Image: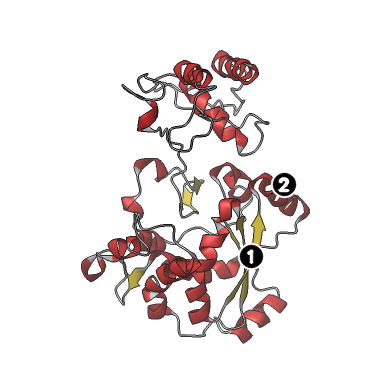
Amino acid sequence: MKTSVYNYMKRAGKIQRRDVLKGLGATGTMAAFSGVATGAGVRPVWAASHDSLRADILKIPGVGMGSPTDSDWQKVGEMCLGPIKEVVSEGEFSGVELTFMGLNNQNLHNFLFRGFLKPWEAYTGATINWIDLAQADYNARLQQSIATGTVDFDIIEMGAPFEGDVLGRGMASVMPDWVMDVIDMDDYVGYLKAPVGTWDGKTYRISIDGDCHTFAYRTDYFGDGSVTGRDVPATWQEINEISMELKGKTDPLTGLDAHGYLDPLKGWGGFGFYFLENRAAAYAKHPNDPAWLFDPDTMKPRVNNPAWVGCDSRMVHFSYS
């Protein structure tokens, strides 16, 4: 969209901030995920002659070659500009400003997105302004914006727990089918496919991480001759026992105190609830009844049932032990 047309439509009330994302944001999706646009349709960049893209990205700087920096992220963004150049003229979005709200945890999230999108900004002429939030401040900022009608962002990095707040209010654009083709949604792992990322049967989001907690452990902590001398724990009770047994022992790599499983026990609101769910799933989730957070018919919370209460009581006991 030409800048003059965009400004006119905005002044005339014929377009809202989020409406422009139906075209521009979707185009940005092409830049980020590099499908190749043709007259007939869109195909994923890792098809045909571009099947080496993933391997090329891993070389910048590459596995086992240190942590990438902003300049490396920009290289990746530049590598992914192919489809943008198929559908957007250089400088076509000059003068357009977008605001991106996301996290700045551990110098990741928005810091990575900045690097990835700098080549996109340079080519299209658009400018992205950034709202960087600590994870602890994110929920309050989002909810306040919604409640007061002062939404000041066009693009949002958002966890699944907030989809009801945003998608349920019709505040996001539905993903076009051609974007699904570009990012090859059929290649998603099963637990990221619909209904995840959908609302009323429509897909709204592109997943940028696994949305799934995994259990990782160090091999020098388990097995014969290890720090614990025990097998890898299979239950939460065993995890608790081992965590207690490690008190006073030394980590073989750092020479510092050894630690077991670390829980964020300072409050369970917001994102801290994720880690409570880690434990509660073992008590409350069953194949015969996949709905474990709410009753699907009444939406009554299930946090007071025996499984959740049992999990909570064990967590409280462990936190004071």
What residue appears at the point 50 percent right and 18 percent down from the top-left corner? 245
Instruction: Reply above or below: 27 against 244.
Output: below
| Nearer-the-camera pick, 143 or 297 | 143
Decide if residue 22 is in sight here. Answer: no
Instruction: Reply above or below: 231 against 265.
Output: above
What residue appears at the point 35 percent right and 45 percent down from the top-left corner? 189
Residue 213 coordinates in the image, percent (x, y): 46, 37
Residue 179 in which image quadrant: bottom left
Decide if residue 73 is in sight here. Answer: yes
Instruction: Reply above or below: 194 against 284.
Output: below
The residue labelled by disc 1 is 130
The label on residue 140 is 2
Measure the alpha-carbon separation of dots 2 and 1: 17 Å
Q: Label 1 crowding class (10 Å Cα cut-off): few <14, some 14-19, many 20+?
A: some
Q: Label 2 crowding class (10 Å Cα cut-off): few <14, some 14-19, many 20+?
A: few
Quarter occupied by the N terminus: bottom right
Q: Nearer the viewer, mark 2 or mark 1?
A: 1
Residue 4 coordinates in the image, percent (x, y): 63, 86
Residue 40 in which image quadrant: bottom left
Mark 2 lies on a secondary structure that is: helix
| Nearer-the-camera pick, 273 or 38 | 273
Kind of residue indicated by mark 2? Ala
Instruction: Reply above or below: 233 against 186.
Output: above
Quarter occupied by the C terminus: top right
Q: Residue furthest front?
A: 255
The label on residue 160 is none
Residue 291 coordinates in the image, percent (x, y): 49, 27
User: Which mark sits nearer the N-terminus, 2 or 1?
Assistant: 1
